[in-house]
Amino acid sequence: MEEKKFAITPKGLRLMVVGLVVMVAGYILMCGPAVKDPAVFNYDMFDFRRIVVAPVVIVCGVIVEIVAIMRTGKKKE
C-alpha cells in the first residue's frame, strides 16, 4: 500500500506557526497608545519601534513563512 505524503512536513508546519507568531509580534509592536486628544499631534507615531523595528520583525516572519513552505522533507528510498 502506498503511503500518502503531505506537501508540508510537520516540521514545516511548526515553522509556519512560528512565522505567524513572529508576524503577529511585529504588528503588536506597530500598535501604540490611544490618542487622548485628536486635535493634538502625537509624535509617538514616528517612534523608532514603529518605523523600523516592527517592519523588520514582520519581514523576518514572512521569510520564516517562505522557508517553511519551500522546505522539503528528507526522501526515504
Image: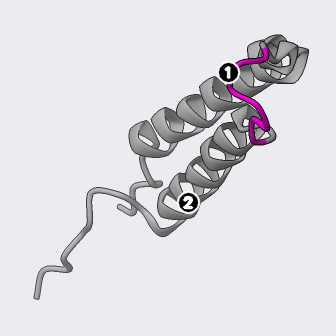
Q: Which residue is mark 2?
A: 17
Which quadrant of the structure image shows residue 55? top right
**Left or right position of 29 against 16:** right
Q: Position of residue 18 (x, y in %)?
A: 64, 55
User: Where 74 sits versus 6, above or below?
Assistant: above
How would you rate the neighbour count of disc 2 (Cα within 10 Å): few for under 14, some for 14-19, many for 20 or more? Answer: some
Q: How is the image coloured?
A: one colour
Choose mark 2 or mark 1, whichever is in front. 1
Q: CA distance from mark 2 to mark 1?
A: 19 Å
For the point 26% across and 66% down, which residue is it? Answer: 6
| Magenta residues, start to end | 34-40
Q: Position of residue 2 (x, y in %)?
A: 13, 80
**Left or right position of 67 against 72:** right
Q: Which mark is residue 55?
A: 1
User: Where 35 sits versus 52, above or below?
Assistant: below
For the N terminus, give its image quadrant.
Answer: bottom left
**Left or right position of 71 against 56:** left
For the C terminus, give its image quadrant.
Answer: bottom left
